[in-house]
Amino acid sequence: MEFCSIRSLEAVCLGSSLGLAGLFYYIYRNKRKTVDKLNEAPQLAVDGELVNLLNQTPGKCLQYVVIEGAVQPVGEPLRSQFQEGTVGVIEKLVLQEHKLVWNSFARTWTDSERVLHQRVNAVPFNIVGSDQAVVRVLCPLEATGLKMEIIHEKFHQANFGFTDIIGQYLSGEKPKGQLETEEMLKVGATLTGVGELILDTDRIVKLRPPSNGAEYFLSTSDFEALRLEQEGEVMVWRVLASVCALVGVAAVLWVARRYYRTLQEKWEMDRLRREFRRISEEVDDGRSAGEEPLENSCVICLSNPRSCVLLDCGHVCCCFSCYQALPQPTCPICRQNIRRVVPLYQA
Ligand SMILES: [Zn+2]
Ligand SMILES: [Zn+2]
């Protein structure tokens, strides 16, 4: 049926908006669960009591807790490559290439960045609380939310000669230079950790990624800031999911409206067809009774009586079946557009 077919653009719009809404909703649900778990997680002080608490807990394991303390290396700390005297436990070195790329679509030069080289070093470390109680942090690189302090940043400007510049215009790429950064989780920095706390066989309290699938967090900001940041992300995904769902609903309504209009046109056509059939039957009856030849026959088929008033020109020149067979909706006499057709009633 042609009137219930969905056009390809509408199908793409409908499919992608509903698909994206589903995907965003899925991400939103996961984020929501993460935040709910964060809200439920107890905040524990890192002190001597922690070992006793874990000893009393079945399995010597607390599934999801929040702890806070100062970073301290277990052995030798890492030394900064660029800043004399700075020591830390995680170090990230990044070399990034910055260039301008000609965007032929927007007709401008746009910034483009590319990581040329990246290296992360880490040494084992503890979170230290009051009265020298420590918690060993396991797998810190698996944690989310760890933004380290940038302790070194240097931009190496690219130098060019005249021929380089011509080459750049031809290739559509202008190198700006390279950015060298060093980030470090410094010794002594305050760290908030959210994860599973266990008392291991070596009598050391350890924080590790939760075994129940909850998210593992390490953050240099405090717990409240971490929680609020996660709440913000939940909000963003919720808004995105709602917008996509609304677009999907709008597309469904649009298709439904068009479908209804096509149906209406079909009903109107059926009604007209019935009306014309009735009139032509009446005329046939009259003709067979009176046996008179047809004077006002259709100018196209020359056999049926003229039964249509073409509007707006008002010509009465053809029968309904010839009107339907017209290749274009124009009057066969004056070529004016036919906006509407009404049956001709002869009394
Ligand atoms: Zn005709
Ligand atoms: Zn006409």
Image: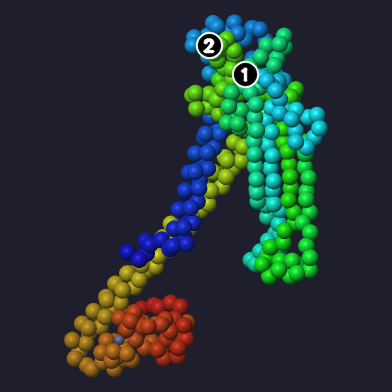
In the image, what residue type sits under mark 2? Thr
On the image, the x and y values in percent for residue 207 come to 59, 20
As drawn, 70 above or below 289: above
| The disc label shown at residue 201, or none | 2
Residue shown at 73%/42% (left/top)? Answer: 181
Relative side of 324 to 137, left or right: left
Residue shown at 59%/23% (left/top)? Answer: 138
Residue shown at 69%/48% (left/top)? Answer: 96
Locate residue 338: give its quadrant.
bottom left
Please state which of residues 34 and 243 is positioned toward the viewer in this rendering: 34
Quick check: can you spot residue 204?
yes
Distance from Cα at disc 2 to Cα at disc 1: 13 Å
Quick check: can you spot residue 195?
no
On the image, the x and y values in percent for residue 118 come to 65, 42
Relative side of 336 to 206, left or right: left
In the image, what residue type sits under mark 1? Arg
Pointer 1: what residue?
136
